[in-house]
Image (tube, rainbow, N blue to C red):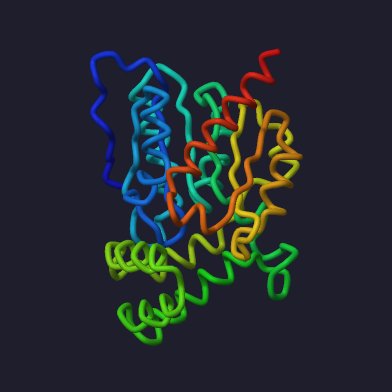
Amino acid sequence: MPVPSSTTPGPHVSGPHVVVLPGTGSDEVFARRVFGPAVAELDGVLHAPRPASGSALVRELLTALDTAASRTAAPLLVGGVSLGAHVAAEWALRNAERCAGVLAVLPAWNASPDDHPGGPAGAAPAATAARASADLIERHGLEEALRLSTDGVPAWLADELSRAWRRHGDGLAAGLRTAAGHAAPTLEQLRGCRVPVGIVACVDDPVHPVSVARAWAEALPHARVHETTLAAFGADPALAGRAAAAAWRAAADHRSR
């Protein structure tokens, strides 16, 4: 099970308990960078579970959300990046009465990742990339796979991959394959979502197409989407967390009218 990691609530915390999940091959350190400042501005309590390594990845992320919900009487605000956004939305659909909303940064696909427009043979680009990374690790080992995967990428991304992949250890390839095969909610399922959702997308991100975020926003009854760029996201990931929180608040305000 993921090791729980959370902020220590101050004496006057009045905001939500927020559980945030990382993307494929990422970790709770980056999830904190994305969402921590926004949660602080909400006067909330941030929970960022460390992801399990290996094939238990998705199952344990869902378990971490269940565990967090069992420890507070108030509904959770749940969120994540890429795979983490998918899992948060999946949990929200199953637990609407325990959920205050979703913060979805860079959703990568809807429904099956293997039946998706825009990728090779219909596969979602993020799933294709995760499988290619798993292949590199299995063929060449972690360090050579990192060298190949970070060659020519922005420095911030190289740093994130280098830290997070090493922390996943021997289970990394299996975790990448598990993530790449996990279905996100379908658009039809999203149409039945009862909670407000704030979405953030990068208009120039080929791995997390902005068309996916727009499709989510169109399907969800109570959603707002904020669009930015990869350069802005890389320069300050917290901008995405703040944008997701602002979009969530806007969606919640519209729903209450």
**Quadrant in which residue 6 is drawn:** top left
Q: Considering only vertical position in the picture, is 180 above or below 93? A: below
**In-image side of 23 versus 72 (left or right):** right
* Location of residue 243 in the rendering, given as x and y in whole percent from the top left corner: 54, 38
* Location of residue 89 in the rendering, given as x and y in whole percent from the top left corner: 57, 40
* Location of residue 227 in the rendering, given as x and y in whole percent from the top left corner: 63, 46
Number of residue marks = 0
- Quadrant of image for the C terminus: top right
Direction bottom: furthest residue: 140
Is any part of residue 128 visible from this angle?
A: yes
Q: Considering only vertical position in the picture, is 170 above or below 5? A: below
At a point 41% along the width and 64% down the height, the residue shown is 157
At a point 45% along the width and 75% down the height, the residue shown is 134
Q: Who is closer to the viewer here, 220 or 2?
A: 220
**In-image side of 112 versus 175 (left or right):** right
Is any part of residue 1 visible from this angle?
A: no
Q: Who is closer to the viewer here, 222 or 191?
A: 222
* Location of residue 250 in the rendering, given as x and y in whole percent from the top left corner: 62, 25
